[in-house]
Image (tube, rainbow, N blue to C red):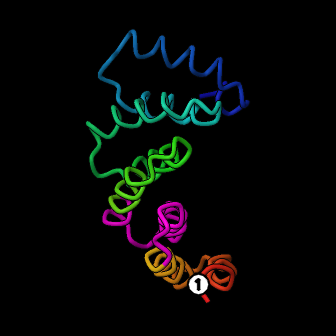
């Protein structure tokens, strides 16, 4: 975690790999390694690690959101939307989950769905959502 905090993601991954080698059942390490991989733009690797983490932590909204963001970068928009929907179902009060969902829906040309998500994000206090609504929804 110190290496991660120091932005040494490669070093953090090496340490996470060793931690997993020593204890494959510490699923939190998979989530941490997934985040480090995400910052190194290894989105496919991040998705694999987030999926392992989620397999043991099915009610972790942040993990679904993080996996959804990684899926955006590999153009898996349907998968991203499914993950954002799951994150929202677990914790519907996080405005940025709706923003992320809107991005994926825009990529799928679902303007109405994206605009509804942006509106909800705005209601939850994400003021930048209103600029996007002005740009894409009017």
Residue 66 point in image, percent of width and height = 48, 47
How many labels were placed on the picture?
Answer: 1
Residue 129 point in image, percent of width and height = 62, 77
Q: Secondary structure at mark 1?
A: loop
Question: Picture quarter containing residue 51?
Answer: top left
Q: Residues within 10 Å of mark 1 (few under 14, many from 20)?
A: some
Tell me if 35 is positioned left or right of 82 in this view: right
Seen from the viewer's position, the closer of residues 133 and 67 is: 133
Establish if 49 lies above or below 112: above
Query: What residue lies at 58% left-to-right and 31% top-to-bottom?
Result: 36
28 within the magenta span:
no
Seen from the viewer's position, the closer of residues 79 and 66 is: 79
Residue 105 point in image, percent of width and height = 47, 65
- For disc 1, the marked residue is 137
Residue 79 point in image, percent of width and height = 38, 50
**Quadrant into which the C terminus falls:** bottom right
Specify the farthest residue to the bottom. Answer: 138
Query: What residue lies at 32% left-to-right and 59% top-to-bottom?
Result: 86
92 within the magenta span:
yes
Tell me if 89 is positioned left or right of 117 in this view: left
Question: Picture quarter containing residue 81?
Answer: bottom left
Tell me if 7 is positioned left or right of 52 in this view: right
Establish if 59 lies above or below 137: above
Q: Which residues make up the magenta segment?
A: 87-111
């Amino acid at each position: 975690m110190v290496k991660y905090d120091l932005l040494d993601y490669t070093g953090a991954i090496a340490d996470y790999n060793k931690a997993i080698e020593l204890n494959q059942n510490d699923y939190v390490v998979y989530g941490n390694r997934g985040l480090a991989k995400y910052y190194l733009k290894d989105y496919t690797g991040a998705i694999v690690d987030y999926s392992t983490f989620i397999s043991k932590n099915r009610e972790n909204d942040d993990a679904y959101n993080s996996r959804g963001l990684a899926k955006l970068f590999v153009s898996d928009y349907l998968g991203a939307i499914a993950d954002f929907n799951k994150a929202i179902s677990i914790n519907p009060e996080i405005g940025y989950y709706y923003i992320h969902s809107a991005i994926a829906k825009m990529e799928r040309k679902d303007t109405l769905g994206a605009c509804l998500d942006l509106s909800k994000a705005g209601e939850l206090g994400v003021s930048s959502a209103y600029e996007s609504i002005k740009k894409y929804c009017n």
